[in-house]
Amino acid sequence: MTLDEFDNWCLAASGLQRDAEGNWAAAHSGEVSFPEEAHADLAVIEDSSYWFAHRNAVIASIVGQFPPGGTIFDVGGGNGFVSRGLSRAGQDCVVIEPGIAGVRVARQRGLKAIHSSFEALLAPPESIPAIGLFDVLEHIEDAGAALSALNRSLCPGGMIYVAVPAFSFLWSVQDSYGGHFRRYTLGRLARNLRQSGFDPLFGTYFFSSLVAPVFLLRTLPSALGFRRGENAASNGANEHRLPAGAIGRALQGSFEWEARRISAGRTVPVGASCVIAARKISGI
């Protein structure tokens, strides 16, 4: 999507107008269950985070195996970290983000970005080739209604890529701080997509080696009251650095194993996150 095509699409979206800086924005960007201050925290750690690096590798691999028919609209795209990774892999992306802090970082990263929630931009029906929801769906209370609205905006046969945190038994104060309503299994996510008019093509877990650490270092302390919301952000930043020595090498090796397996079209049976690529069912 060229800049002219991007501008034409934004003109057709009746909820958008130019803001004071000349960028596209909704009159009311909408609300999302995510702390606005977290965008600045994430911008500091994203480039050096093993977690963000591996998630990007998994997403790029799956998008490459199940390619979109055009531009990917990265809904709730935050600072544009996933979109930048996909762009480097040859995919064209547009970031749609209701938080102005995230939009500004995305634009600084050279990405096309719209300051809006998806609902507020009023996308024309069947006008979007592909949609990415990368750790977004868990922030939406009525996930089924959101998926159905996204389906209506997709072109016939359009693709959707959804990554979410996995397994309710891994719930912790970090989920509460982040504004999550739920964690998923692949089965639940696939059912939600089918009910909203999508055909799941491929799904897998990832971060398999983090299941035990997350449970021991986040879930149990949260359940016992040893880990509280005010410490969640700083603790989360520390957890984005691999530990030194053998443990760090083992974790890195597990991520490389997952990347090879997923790139070969095979699945990982368990993990702290999961992702599905699905196609809009024609006629729905």
Image (cartoon, rainbow, N blue to C red):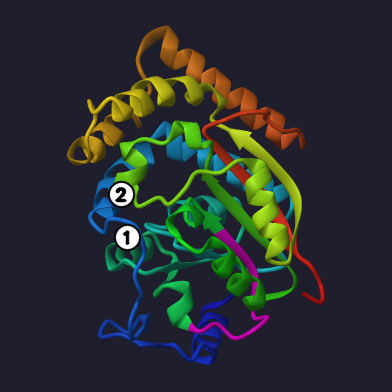
Q: Residue at x 43, y 80 (%)?
A: 120
Q: Exactly how many numbered labels are in the figure?
A: 2
Q: Is residue 154 above or below residue 132?
A: below
Return the residue found at the far top.
246
> Looking at the picture, which amino acid does disc 2 mark?
Ala
- Residue indicated by mark 2: 43
Examine the rendered structure and indicate whether residue 24 appears above or below residue 56: below
Give neighbour class at mark 1: few <14, some 14-19, many 20+ (Cα, 10 Å): some
**Residue 126 visible:** yes
Q: Is residue 99 magenta?
A: no
The reply to whether discs 2 and 1 touch (Cβ–Cβ < 8 Å) is: yes
Compare marks 2 and 1 and give the one earlier in the sequence: 2
Q: Which of the pair 11/149 is nearer the observer?
A: 149
Q: Which residue is mark 1?
A: 105
Residue 63 in view here: no
The magenta segment: 122-132
Task: Look at 27% across and 51% down and name the residue there.
Answer: 38
- Please name the amino acid that badge 1 sits on: Val
